[in-house]
Image (tube, rainbow, N blue to C red):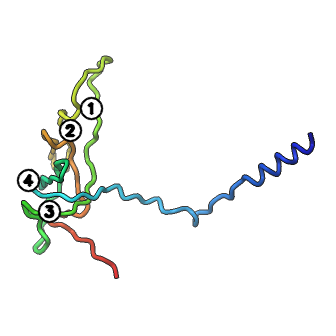
């Protein structure tokens, strides 16, 4: 019996891992943006925001960009294709239906989802465009190209 306890003790000590120090822990910064390549088919504006409509092979996107004044930049143009780093602004889940305990069958893609921006501007999804997005490489109508390091 004593040999079994000693064997379990040795086995338990051998299976323990050392605790990682702060230096061994990888960075927790996560880039939540998604890269997508799409063609701009419409540009609109609402108050202090541009609405850039982009489509790829599968989906259409509505990208919201705050208006800024830039004298020189690589301005996006309709019927041109660009790489966007997009972040989703709206949720894919439908809003709760009041206090009803009975689920109602609906197509959640038909529900307009809206986001309130500064200056009481509310921008909503549209039929065929299920979510709103922002783009981290878009400033106003200017596409920001990342400089390559040498």
Label drawn at residue 45: 4
Cα–Cα gap, marks 1 and 4: 27 Å
* Picture quadrant where residue 49 is located: bottom left
Measured as percent of width and height from the top left, residue 86 is found at 25, 56
- The first of marks 3 and 1 along the sequence is 3
Measured as percent of width and height from the top left, residue 129 is found at 16, 43
Label drawn at residue 112: none
Query: Residue drawn at (20%, 44%), measured in percent from left and top?
Result: 116
Q: Is residue 79 left or right of residue 135?
A: left
Instruction: Choose between 113 and 82: the one closer to the eye.
Output: 82
Cα–Cα gap, marks 2 and 4: 18 Å
Q: Which residue is mark 2?
A: 113
Q: Which residue is mark 1?
A: 95
Q: Secondary structure at mark 2?
A: loop
Q: Which residue is mark 3?
A: 81
- The first of marks 2 and 3 along the sequence is 3
Cα–Cα gap, marks 3 and 1: 34 Å
């Amino acid at each position: 019996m004593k040999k079994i306890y000693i064997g379990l003790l040795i086995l338990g000590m051998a299976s323990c891992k050392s605790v990682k120090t702060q230096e061994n822990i990888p960075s927790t910064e996560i880039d939540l943006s998604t890269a997508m390549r799409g063609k701009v088919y419409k540009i609109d504006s609402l108050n202090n925001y541009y609405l850039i409509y982009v489509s790829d092979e599968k989906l259409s996107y509505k990208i919201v960009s705050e208006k800024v004044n830039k004298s020189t930049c690589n301005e996006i143009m309709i019927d041109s294709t660009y790489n966007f780093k997009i972040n989703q602004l709206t949720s894919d889940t439908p809003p709760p239906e009041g206090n009803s305990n009975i689920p109602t069958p609906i197509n959640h893609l038909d529900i307009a989802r809206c986001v309130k921006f500064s200056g009481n501007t509310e921008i909503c999804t549209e039929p065929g465009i299920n979510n709103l997005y922002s783009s981290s490489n878009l400033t106003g109508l200017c596409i920001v190209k990342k400089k390559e390091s040498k």
